Image (cartoon, rainbow, N blue to C red):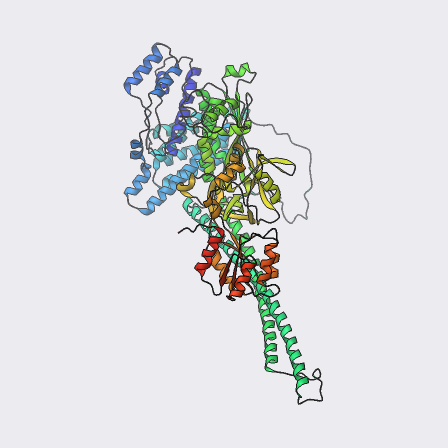
Amino acid sequence: PSAQAIQTIRFAQDDIAVRLQKLRDQSIDEDNPILIARLRQIAAGQEISAQPVVAPVVIPEPSSSQIDEIELTVPEENTQEMQALLVDEPVEIEQLIVEQQQTLPEEDHNVNNAVEDALPPVLVKAFEQADDAQVAIVESYLEEAEELLEQADAVFEQWLNDRSNRNVLLTLQRTYHTMKGNARVVNEVAISVIAGQLEMVFEQFSLYQFSSSRYDELLQQAQHWLRNAIFKGQSEGENELKARLQAIRYEDSLIPADEVLSSTIDFEGTDQYAFVEGDGSTPPSMYAEIKKVQEQAQEQIRISADLVEKMIDLSGENAINRSRIELDLGQMTFTLSEMELAILRLADQLRRMEGELETQILTKHEVSGQRYESFDPLEMDQYSSLNQLSKSLVESVTDLVDFKNTLSDKIRDTESLLLQQSRIQSELQQNLMGTRLVPFARLVPRLQRLVRQTSTQLNRPVDFNIENTEGELDRNILERLVSPLEHMLRNAIDHGIEDQEQRAQVGKAATGRITLNIAREGNDILVIFSDDGRGIDVAAVRSKAEQNGLITANMQVSDIDVMQYIFNSGLSTAKKVTQISGRGVGLDVVQSEIKALGGHVSVNSELGKGTEFTIRVPTTVAVSDALMVKVGEQQFALPLAQIERIVRVSPVALAEYYEGTSEQFELDHQLYRLRYVGEFVTGQARPILNNMGSSIPVIIFNSGGRSVALQVDQLVGSRAQIVIKSIGKQMSSVGFVGGATILADGRVSLILDGSSIARRVLTTKRPQQAEVVVQQSAETRTARRRTIMVVDDSVTVRKVTSRLLERNGFDVVTAKDGIDAIEVLATVTPDLMLLDIEMPRMDGFEVAAHVRHDSKHKQLPIIMITSRTGEKHREHAFSLGVNQYMGKPFQESELLENIQNILGIVKVS
C-alpha cells in the first residue's frame, strides 16, 4: 500500500478510538463521510492522491446523552458524489471539510433522550430474567471489564515501546486470563474464547521472547473486538479472529531448528574450584536457592463508589461533631476557671468575715463578763452560732476546691482522649480519601490522541510532552479536568501554535512544542500548561475589554491583569470561529469548571514567545484546611492554600490609607493593593476601625503570581479543618463564594474564594472617600451592630440586661463598679452606657462626671438605671449630663425604645 493509504488507515484507527471514547462519555457522534469515501477508495484498489486526510472531528463539548450504537454510514447519494469527486478529478479536501461542517445538523436532543436508557446487551438479558443476583453479577462483570480493558490498553502501549520487558507480557497474560474467567461466569462464550486466545498469544510471546511488530495491528483489532463484544454485543467475526490468533500461536511456537541453534550462546567454563565445607554427614543441597519475591500480591475487594462517598461524608460529619465537643470542652474549661476565681473570692470573704467575728467577740468580752473571767479571750476560744456557720462555710469552700481539682483532672483526661481521637479521625479520613485518588497518567493517552488528531487536521506538527504524571488526584476532579484541558489544547494548537511558514519566518522550529507539567504544592495540584506559539496580544485583549465595558480607556491596568480578562464570557480575539477550538465561547468555561473544583486558573504570556496557563486545584474536594475570619458580624472561611502570610497593621495606618486616594499600601517595605473584604461580601467598602484593639489582621493572597492584601476585622482561632459542602445551583453563581461548611457550634459559614477576590482587587479601583460617604445611607449607618456597656454591681442585673441586649442585636461589655468601668473605657469605646448609681469604690454619679470631663468619651450617651427614683437623684443625674433616667425594675420594651431613640436606630418590624 502507498504512504497515503497507510496514513488514511491510521486516521481511521484514531477515528474509531474517538468514537469509542464518545460511547464511554455518553455523547452523540457524527459521521465523517470524507474518511469513509477514502477507505472505500482504498478497498477498491484505486490510487490515493497525496492530499491532506481528514482527521476525525472531535466535538469540544460532548452531550451528556448515552448512545447505544453509531453507524459509520453515509447516504448513498452523498457517497456516490464523494467517490466521483475523489476518483475523477482532484479537489481541495479542506474545501470539502468546510462544506461538510456547514451542513452538519444540530444535535437532536430528542434523539439523545430516546437512546439515553441504552444498556449493554448482557445487562439487558439479566434484567429480563428478573434475577437480582444475576444483575448484580453482570454489573460487577461490566465494571471490572472496563478496568481490565483500560489496563490492557495501557500495558500494551508499554510493550510496544519496550518489547524486551517480559513483566509487561506477564501482566497482559494475567489480565486476559481474568477477563476469560469473568466472561465464563456470565456465560459469554465468545468473549471467553477470544480472551483465552490472547492469553495464549502473550504467553508464547513471553516464552519465546517474541519482539516482532507484524502482529500489532491484529492484536489491536482483537482488543477493539472485545470492547465491542462486551459493551455493545457485537461479536461478529469471532471464528475468523480466533483462527488468526491461533495462527500467531502456531507460527511462533514452531521456530525452525536452525534459528534456535543460531541463537545459542557458547558457554565458557572457569578453572576456579572450592572445597565443600562440613564433616560430610549432611549432603549439600542439589537445588539452587530461589530468590524470594518481596512483593506479595495484595488482596483487593470491590466496593461501590456511592458507599465510599457515604463513608467520607460520615467521616466529615464525625469531624464536625468532634469540633463541637472540643468547643464545649473549651467552654467547660473557661467555666471551671471562672469557678476557681469565685472560690477564691468566697474564701477571701470568709476570712474577712472571721476577722469581723473575732473583733465582735473581743468587744463583747470587754462589755460583759464571761464565765471564764480568769482567761484572756486569746487563751480560750469563744464560739457562737456565727462562728460555727463560718467554719462550716470554710469546709464547704475546701470541698469545692477538691471538686474543682477533680473536674480539672477529668477535663485534661478528656482532652488527651480527644486528641487521640482526632489523630485517628484524621488518619481514617486520609485513607478514605486515598480510595478516590487516581493517577494523572490515566488522562495521558486521551490527551495525546487529541493533540495528534488536531495537529494533523490543521497541518501543524506539535511535540506534546507531559511531565511528572505520577501525581494523584481525586477521581471526580480528574474527570472534570478533562474538558478544560482538552479545550486548552485545542486553543493552543488552533490559536497559539503558528503555521509552519509563520514559524519559519520568525526563526522557530517547524514543530511546535506544548508542555504539560504536573506538580504538587501542599494539598494542591498544579497543572502548568505552556506552548511556544504566538502568545497573547495584550493590546487586542485590552481593546476587547474596553468594548465590553470591563475597563475604561484611562484606567491603569497592567498587562498581566489585562490577560486575565480572556477568562471573561464573550471576550475572544480570534478572527474566526472553527470546529476545533470553540463555538463562540471563550476560556470562561475553563475558569468556571476550575472554580467549581475549588481551584483557580491564571495566564501569563509574552507576545511571540508563547503562553503559560497555571491551574491550581485541591487534591480532594471533601476536606480542606482553612482560616476562619470575621467580617462585620459574619464569619467566613478562607482556604489556607491561597494564603501567603498574615500581618498585623495599626488602625491609624489603615485609617490614613482609607482616607487617602492611593491604591498601594506598604507592608514590610513592599507595596500591595489593599481592600477591605467587606466590600465584596457585605457591601461595606470601609471598615469600622473603632474598638478593634491595637492591631488589625491583613491577609496576603496570591493570584496569578501577584500578591494583594485583604483586611478582615478579626481572626477566629487559627488553622481549622473544614468539611466542604456544596452550596447548590441557586448560590453557585454568587461571586467570591466557593462553598460552605458547618462550624463547631452548628452554624453554617460560607467559604470565600480568595483568588477571585484578589483578581477583582487587581483589576478594579477601590471606592474613594467621597464615594463611600454617598454609599453609606442612613439605613447602612444604623444597621451595624452597636456596643453597649452595662455598669452595675449586681451580677443578676448584668446578666439579665446583657442577654436582653444580645437578643436584640447589640454587643455588650460589662463592668461591676465605677473603677472597673473606667478601666474598660480605656480599651473600648461603647456606643451607649447603662449606669447604676449605688456601687462600691465609685458610684454612678462619679462615673458620669468622669465621662463628661473626658475628651474621648464626653459625647457618650448615658442611661442611668437605679432604684433611687426620687426627684433629687433625677435632677442631679441630669445636671451631670445623663441622657435618660429610668427606675428599677425596668420594662424591657421601654429600655429598648430609649436605646433606639438615643442611637437613632430605625426599628424594623
Residue 319 x %, y %: 49, 52
Q: How many marks?
A: 0
State the residue at coordinates (60%, 49%): 693
Residue 360 visible from this viewpoint: yes
Residue 221 x %, y %: 40, 28
Query: Is 582 positioned to the left or the right of 261 in the image?
Result: left
Residue 659 x %, y %: 57, 39
Relative to the observer, which residue lies in front, 282 or 844? 844
Residue 253 visible from this viewpoint: no
Rendered position, 98 above or below 179:
above
Rendered position, 746 above or below 129:
below
Relative to the observer, which residue lies in front, 2 or 276? 2
Q: Quadrant of residue 343?
A: bottom right
Relative to the observer, which residue lies in front, 28 or 666? 666
Residue ranking furthest to the top: 89
Location of the N terminus (image quadrant): top left
Residue 790 x %, y %: 54, 59
State the residue at coordinates (63%, 48%): 282
Rendered position, 186 above or below 371:
above
State the residue at coordinates (29%, 21%): 75
